[in-house]
């Protein structure tokens, strides 16, 4: 055995670093493994909501500082050229680039005592992770936080995701025009069974489109059209692509002493795109489940403890998946857009991002405002 640790965390993004940081606070020995040395790039809008900010403070003791975040209070909702709602006094939203953000969280996990390693998982043999370079790492509990294309999930289940339900996104980092006013934009017409986003950052704008891959089809044309509208100054900016688990969460996120967290567990909200908060929360919950299981001498009970802790998150994602059927199908789109533009739904959406309300509030608002049209569309 080349190394041995109580907790092996594979993937050093927000979920993995949160798991490592919380596990060290609970007294576990931790190895934090990533296939690439940090800092490194990730496809992500980089929106840190109020919910995410609370998780950062709770897990890392990290506040919202101007060196890492651009804070905006201006949110605009669009359907192509049509502005559905413009909110210049929205709850604060914090925008960050994943390269420095992930590196900061990784550094805080290492500062807490996690041992950082670089390497790619090849397979899992019992209580041993075998890397592609031949190294073998023994563990008592393993947390796979290695993204939507998780090698840990592949080792457990034969595949990382369901091709019928996985999402896909394309994204560029565009220069900020001189007149940029830090507005955060979401466009519900930018992609079929998905949406577009334009998020300001220090020195750039992150512009992208994403949707359910099997229903959205080839996103290249959608990305080109949205880029022409949202970032005509982008020029030849490099396009990044990645799988996105839009609500395709795993009801059983692991096996025994092996747990999945963050994108690897499919924990991304399919409506708001919220992934960072769920990554931070699930990483911390996985670490707590591991510590509890080890403390009682039953590491194979880690998954049962973790599933119990995840119930509120899973319940919200089930609501979001149902809500997606009010938003994405073409027959429902006019009903949704009318309801969104003529009701309090934009304010409720913002409160949802901030973690102040739940999906039931949004759904009841839409039904109350457009009941006849909604039921006609549902029957159709």
Image: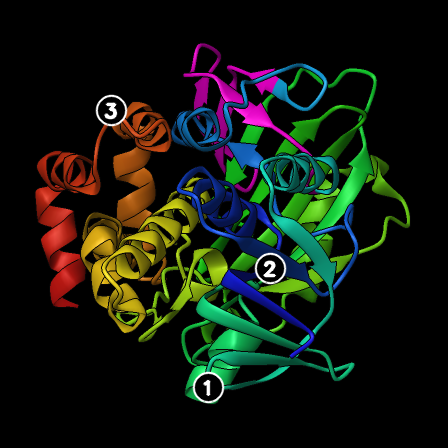
Which segment did they paint magenta?
A: 71-98
Q: What distance separates the C-alpha of mark 2 from that of mark 3?
A: 39 Å
* Residue 4 shown left or right of residue 278 in the figure: right
Q: Within 10 Å of the Cα at label 2, are there few (<14), some (14-19), or many (20+) other Cα atoms?
A: many
Q: Which mark is residue 228?
A: none
Label 2: element kind: loop
Per the image, the residue denoted by label 2 is: 11
Residue sitting farthest toward the right: 236
- Dot 2 or dot 1: first in sequence order is 2
Are the two marked residues, 1 and 3, in contact with CB atoms closer than 8 angstroms? Answer: no
- Residue 345 percent across, percent down from the top left: 27, 30
Q: Is residue 366 left or right of residue 123?
A: left
Left or right, residue 237 beside residue 271: right
The residue wearing badge 3 is 344
SS type, badge 3: loop
Q: Is residue 88 magenta?
A: yes
Q: Nearer the viewer, residue 372 or 311?
A: 311
In 3D space, how far apart are the residues under numbered discs 2 and 1 (Cα atoms)?
19 Å
Q: Residue at x 72, y 65 (%)?
A: 35
Name the image quarter holding the C terminus: bottom left
| Residue 262 visible in the displayed image | yes
Residue position for label 1:
126
Q: Is residue 321 above or below residue 188?
A: below
- Label 1 and label 3: CA atoms lie apart by 53 Å
* Residue 203 in which image quadrant: top right
**Disc nearest the viewer among 2 and 1:** 1
């Amino acid at each position: 055995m080349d190394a041995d640790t109580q907790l092996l965390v594979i993937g050093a993004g927000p979920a993995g670093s949160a798991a490592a940081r919380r596990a060290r606070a609970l007294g576990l020995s931790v190895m934090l493994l990533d296939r690439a040395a940090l800092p490194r790039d990730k496809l992500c809008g980089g929106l840190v909501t109020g919910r995410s900010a609370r998780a950062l403070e709770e897990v890392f003791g990290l506040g919202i500082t101007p060196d890492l975040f651009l804070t905006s209070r201006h949110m605009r909702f669009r359907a192509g050229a049509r502005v559905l709602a413009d909110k210049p006094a929205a709850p604060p939203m914090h925008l960050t680039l994943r390269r420095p953000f992930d590196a900061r969280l990784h550094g805080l996990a290492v500062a807490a005592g996690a041992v950082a390693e670089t390497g790619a998982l090849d397979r899992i043999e019992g209580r041993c992770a075998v890397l592609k370079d031949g190294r073998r790492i023994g563990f008592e509990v393993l947390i796979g936080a290695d993204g939507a294309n998780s090698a840990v999930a592949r080792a457990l289940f034969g595949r990382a995701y369901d091709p019928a339900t996985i999402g896909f996104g394309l994204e560029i980092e565009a220069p900020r025009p001189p007149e940029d006013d830090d507005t955060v934009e979401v466009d519900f017409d930018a992609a079929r069974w998905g949406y577009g986003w334009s998020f300001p950052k220090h020195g750039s704008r992150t512009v992208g489109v994403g949707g359910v891959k099997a229903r959205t089809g080839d996103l290249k044309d959608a990305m080109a059209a949205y880029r022409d509208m949202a970032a005509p100054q982008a020029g030849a900016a490099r396009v990044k692509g990645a799988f996105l688990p839009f609500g395709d969460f795993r009801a059983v996120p692991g096996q025994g002493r092996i747990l999945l967290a963050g994108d690897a567990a499919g924990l991304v909200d399919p409506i708001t795109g919220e992934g960072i908060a769920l990554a931070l929360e699930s990483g911390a919950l996985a670490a707590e489940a591991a510590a509890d299981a080890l403390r009682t001498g039953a590491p194979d009970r880690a998954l049962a403890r973790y599933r119990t802790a995840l119930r509120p998150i899973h319940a919200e994602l089930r609501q979001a998946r149902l809500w997606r059927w009010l938003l994405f199908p073409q027959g429902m789109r006019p009903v949704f857009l009318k309801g969104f533009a003529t009701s309090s739904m934009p304010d409720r959406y913002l409160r949802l991002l901030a973690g102040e309300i739940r999906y039931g509030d949004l759904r009841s608002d839409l039904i109350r405002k457009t009941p006849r049209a909604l039921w006609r569309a549902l029957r159709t």
